[in-house]
Image: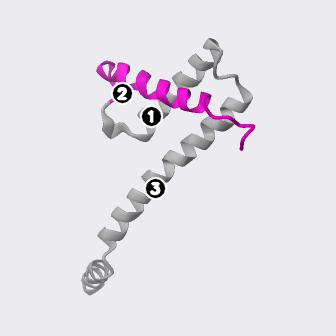
Amino acid sequence: MSFGVHVLREFLRNRCQVRAAGLAYTTLLALIPLLAVSIAVASLMFDVKKPENRQKLSKGLEDMVNYVAPALGLEDSDGEAQRVKVAGDILTFVGNIDFGAI
């Protein structure tokens, strides 16, 4: 019993709840640049302006948004328009990047 009390006391003393929340927040923020880099690399391999490539990437982005952020509630059929809009916005952004300038 004393071991459990000791663990709980140290957990609270070290503010583990706050640290866990900070870690979750930082991880979520780190996913956005990772997504941007992934899409940029994919756009180097595929021409994003071609409709068939754009459709494949869009479908992959929609699936990724559902997997990464299920709390957005976009996995049902009501969220389909929003998923398509998010994927389209990301692909438009990537399509506007001038890789020659990088």
CB-based contact (under 8 Å), mark 3 and mark 1: no
Which amino acid type is marked by label 2?
Glu
**Around disc 2, counting alpha carbons within 10 Å, would you say few (fewer than 14), some (14 to 19), or many (20 or more)?**
some
> Of callouts 3 and 2, which one flags the residue occurring earlier in the amino acid sequence?
3
Q: Which residue is mark 2?
A: 75
For the N terminus, the image quarter is bottom left
Q: Which residue is mark 1?
A: 65
Q: Indicate which label's residue lies in the foreground, 2 or 1.
A: 1
The residue that appears at 26% across and 78% down in the rendered structure is 12
Residue 67 horizontal side relative to residue 12, left or right: right
User: What distance separates the C-alpha of mark 2 from that of mark 1?
Assistant: 9 Å
Q: Indicate which label's residue lies in the foreground, 3 or 2.
A: 3
Frontmost residue, 102 versus 69: 102
Q: Which residue is mark 3?
A: 27
Q: Which range of residues does the magenta coloring cover?
A: 74-102
Residue 62 in view here = no
Which amino acid type is marked by label 3?
Thr
- Horizontal and vertical percent for residue 67? 44, 36
> Of callouts 2 and 1, which one flags the residue occurring earlier in the amino acid sequence?
1
Task: Inspect the magenta stretch and tell me whether residue 78 lies in it.
Answer: yes
**Magenta part mainly helix, strand or loop?**
helix
